[in-house]
């Protein structure tokens, strides 16, 4: 069954008080003096700000008795971070230890005193361990409740939008005098904004329940941002005192001058969310599937000469899943698709997924609304002309000027500029030789009648630093309809990608990017860190041993635990390790995109939700304060730095995929990526057939393999086509032997580094291009019978299993 759409709830607000009482036995990090301790508090579900106590000098047993207050929503996961720090005036403050405490442990009306120690009670008897004593108290706040929208994993809360207008002439006058109007709403998405020559209207978006405050001041342009010398020229306005929907005039006092007038209007953001919260397929994909099913049913009837039309529930969902591999993947995929077209099987395919280089093929094809209905020989000739063309002019002065102009215009529009943006422009010239206005949403024309399969472009979202791709990554998918991160059940319309979002609302609307900028993300090979390289220097068995160990560690951290205490390394070797870890996990050529999950909070039971558990596969999934909704930017990279597969979109149970035609463009190991995909699915409990290869097959792979799981009807039939040169050496077409003069055309060098198709090769000779395309085309045509038999098995399985409970494709739409 499908998952329910997002629902609205009415929930009260609570006041949480946190009294930091004292710490005991704090070890000094200084050589000559005792610790100078303070405690830093961070509760991101209640405030953007990090608060802290005063510093107690020269004491290993500091006493604070300071109380802090937070307005909290108990329907969300409230994890309070308490960091005990040792202040150091010369270097970075030392972290003694950090406590992560789940506020769900505190019940309204209760006063709870907790002693957080680095060791357990039993160990504490042996030695005096460092500890922090804190008192908590909570009560329900009288007054109006809060409306929230949730899919039981993410939560969107009520948002205010504050509009601030300034008299343009007055603002310019102060700018000429060297003074700047600085507006700050600390609890807002925007934070601080400053007046400029061309701006006189400002917007701030903030959570209503946090009771945000506007602070306005005039600041000398020469002053530092946090300079507070001009405190007399300030204005503070609590937003809760403003009438909603009405403009109000306030004045900012100015010493020795006329007060500056500001016009404030507070509005409720009551419109529908721009982020769709829900795990079901979007409405457009559901409608596409209805149309495509008719096309697929008709095609299967022709191919298998069926006596009757297939009913809707008898039509198998067939997908083509391509790996990455640069120009090699792009070129070979054209050959594969041409062969499927010649076998009249393209119309049997519902989904096409690509990663890295194979996304270039998809992006090229879907520029044409009826590409699969026409011969692919024409597009293939165009690709050959570009792939075999000299690329020396990519860095000509003319092109460099064009890149600079495009980068400047994009930054001016509000997009985030990075090396990946430049790579996107160079790649566009490399692939097409000219700029294109073409956008991802233009591909909808190729889907409006169900005339082509629905394409998905696979990518990973990773951390900017601290974590390798292996330790933390999230599958993300792009389609002409939506961009989604499936783990959270969150997606946006494709044209909204890279606009700014807060709490599910699009707060800064940027124009849709040309597709070249998305291709730059899908093939972003520059954002890996050194640790990614170290992981991949090992073989796949070592990779999966590490993976399995990580998954055991994740299971050990039970979500039922309400307290986690983290102690940083204290000795010199520990600190050196930490520094080394920072260096090898830093991504020097980072590509950033605005995060459409920003501001959304986690439901109190998110970690128990079945839909979240299906995608729960990283070391941070039980630590909501470290997950993507709290990040300002997405960091999207090529999937090849985890598993070179585009299959994540096909593993979504709502898509109910019956057959996967796997096209592997790797050199060397013909099964590595498919084996890794199987092992990943096994650990994640995703239905997938067992992939076992004998030693002989690994050394001498055949052109086609079929993998099935007879015991699990949910598992798709996988038809695997590795990139191998077997019978093509002697046959130029199925059953047609090569003459002596044609033997050279059958010699295709696929020996990894020695191959003319090695990943970093940017130009192919016409002969090598033809060989690769002809080989790919031949391998599918030569295995026609095996391919058709597998598809026929899928049809028969669907017909004989009409009582299956298939996923429902209802209830989607924008909340």
Image: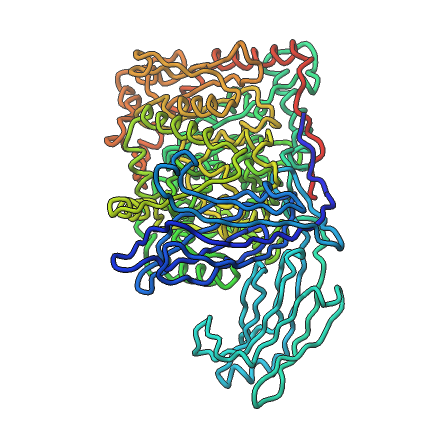
Q: Residue furthest front?
A: 125
Query: Is residue 434 among what the camera can see?
Result: no
Q: Quadrant of residue 666?
A: top left
Along the line of sight, which residue is nearer the eye, 167 or 180?
Answer: 180
Give the left or right position of residue 388, taking residue 367 as reference.
Answer: left
Residue at 52 percent of width and 16 percent of height: 717
Residue at 32 percent of width and 36 percent of height: 759
Rendered position, 172 above or below 735: below
Rendered position, 126 above or below 663: below
The colour mode here is: rainbow
Residue at 28 percent of width and 48 percent of height: 575
Q: Position of residue 416 (x, y in %)?
A: 47, 56
Quadrant (top left/top right/bottom left/bottom right) for the C terminus: top right
Query: Is residue 116 among what the camera can see?
Result: yes
Q: Which residue lies furthest to the bottom in this view?
A: 256
Q: Quadrant of residue 772?
A: top left
Along the line of sight, which residue is nearer the eye, 240 or 358?
Answer: 240
Q: Position of residue 602 (x, y in %)?
A: 59, 43
Along the line of sight, which residue is nearer the eye, 343 or 227?
Answer: 227
Q: Where is residue 622 in the image (x, y as percent from the top left)?
A: 50, 37
Q: Position of residue 587 (x, y in %)?
A: 36, 48
Rendered position, 547 above or below 567: above
Give the left or right position of residue 359, taking residue 602 as reference.
Answer: left
- Give the total number of marks visible in the rendering: 0
Along the line of sight, which residue is nearer the eye, 63 or 374?
Answer: 63
Quadrant (top left/top right/bottom left/bottom right) for the N terminus: top right
């Amino acid at each position: 069954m499908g998952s329910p759409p997002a629902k609205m709830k009415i929930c009260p607000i609570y006041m949480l008080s946190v009294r930091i009482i004292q710490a005991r036995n704090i070890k000094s990090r200084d050589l000559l003096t005792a610790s100078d301790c303070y405690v830093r508090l961070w509760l991101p579900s209640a405030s953007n700000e990090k608060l802290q106590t005063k510093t107690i000098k020269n004491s290993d047993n500091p006493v604070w008795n300071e109380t802090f207050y937070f307005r909290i929503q108990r329907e969300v996961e409230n994890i309070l971070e308490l960091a005990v720090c040792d202040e150091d005036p010369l270097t970075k403050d030392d972290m003694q230890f950090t406590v992560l405490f789940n506020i769900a442990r505190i019940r309204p009306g209760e006063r709870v005193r907790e002693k957080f120690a680095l060791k357990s009670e039993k160990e504490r008897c042996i030695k005096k361990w460092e500890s922090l004593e804190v008192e908590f108290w909570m009560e329900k706040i009288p007054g109006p409740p809060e409306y929230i929208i949730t899919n039981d994993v993410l939560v969107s809360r009520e948002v205010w939008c504050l509009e601030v207008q300034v008299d343009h002439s007055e603002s310019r006058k102060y700018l000429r005098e060297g003074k700047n109007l600085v507006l700050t709403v600390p609890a807002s998405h925007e934070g601080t904004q400053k007046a400029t020559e061309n701006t006189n209207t400002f917007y701030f978006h903030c959570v209503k329940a946090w009771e945000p405050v506007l602070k306005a001041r005039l600041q000398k342009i020469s002053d530092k941002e946090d300079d507070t010398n001009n405190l007399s020229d300030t204005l503070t306005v609590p937003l809760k005192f403003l009438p909603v929907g009405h403009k109000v005039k306030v004045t900012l006092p100015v010493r020795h001058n006329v007060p500056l007038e500001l016009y404030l209007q507070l509005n409720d953001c009551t419109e529908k969310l721009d982020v769709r919260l829900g795990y079901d397929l979007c409405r457009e994909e559901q409608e596409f599937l209805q149309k495509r099913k008719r096309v697929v049913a008709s095609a299967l009837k022709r191919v298998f000469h069926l006596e009757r039309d297939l009913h809707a529930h008898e039509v198998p969902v067939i997908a083509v899943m391509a790996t990455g591999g640069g120009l090699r993947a792009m070129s070979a995929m054209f050959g594969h698709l041409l062969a499927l077209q010649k076998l009249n099987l393209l119309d049997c395919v519902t989904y096409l997924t690509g990663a890295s280089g194979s996304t270039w093929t998809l992006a090229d094809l879907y520029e044409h609304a009826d590409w699969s209905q026409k011969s692919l020989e024409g597009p293939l000739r165009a690709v050959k002309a570009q792939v075999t063309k000299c690329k020396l002019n990519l860095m000509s002065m003319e092109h460099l000027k064009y890149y600079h102009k495009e980068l400047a215009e994009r930054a001016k529009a509000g997009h985030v500029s990075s090396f990946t943006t430049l790579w996107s422009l160079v790649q566009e010239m490399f692939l097409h030789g000219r700029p294109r206005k073409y956008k991802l949403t233009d591909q909808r024309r190729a889907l409006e009648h169900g005339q082509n399969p629905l394409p998905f472009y696979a990518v990973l979202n990773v951390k900017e630093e601290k974590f390798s791709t292996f330790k933390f990554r999230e599958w993300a998918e792009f389609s002409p309809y939506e961009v989604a991160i499936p783990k959270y059940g969150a997606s946006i319309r494709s044209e909204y990608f890279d606009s700014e979002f807060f709490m599910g609302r699009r707060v800064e609307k940027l124009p849709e990017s040309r597709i070249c900028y998305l291709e730059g993300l899908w093939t972003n090979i520059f954002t890996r860190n050194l640790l990614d390289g170290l992981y991949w220097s090992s073989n796949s068995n070592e990779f999966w041993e590490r993976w399995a160990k990580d998954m055991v560690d994740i299971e050990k951290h039970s979500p039922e635990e309400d307290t986690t205490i983290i102690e940083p390394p204290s000795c010199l070797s520990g600190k050196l390790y930490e520094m080394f870890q920072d260096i090898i996990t830093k991504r020097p050529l980072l590509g950033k995109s605005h995060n459409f999950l920003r501001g959304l909070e986690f439901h109190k039971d998110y970690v128990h939700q079945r839909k979240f558990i299906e995608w729960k596969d990283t070391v941070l999934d039980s630590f909501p304060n470290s997950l993507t909704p709290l990040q300002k930017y997405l960091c999207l990279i090529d999937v090849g730095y985890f598993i070179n597969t585009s299959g994540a979109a096909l593993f979504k149970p709502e898509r109910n995929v019956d057959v996967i035609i796997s096209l592997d463009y790797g050199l060397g190991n013909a099964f590595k990526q498919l084996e890794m995909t199987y092992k990943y699915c096994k650990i994640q409990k995703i239905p997938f057939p067992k992939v076992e290869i004998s030693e002989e097959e690994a050394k001498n792979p055949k052109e086609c393999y079929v993998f099935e799981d007879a015991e699990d009807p949910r598992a798709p039939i996988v038809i695997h086509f590795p990139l191998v040169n077997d019978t093509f050496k002697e046959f130029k077409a199925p059953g047609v032997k090569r003459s002596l003069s044609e033997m050279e055309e059958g010699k295709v060098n696929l020996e990894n580094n020695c191959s003319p198709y090695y990943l970093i090769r940017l130009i192919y000779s016409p002969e090598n291009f033809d060989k690769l395309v002809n080989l790919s085309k031949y391998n599918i045509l030569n295995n026609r019978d095996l391919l058709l038999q597998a598809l026929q098995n899928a049809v028969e399985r669907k017909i004989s299993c009409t009582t299956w409970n298939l996923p429902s494709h209802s209830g989607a739409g924008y909340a």
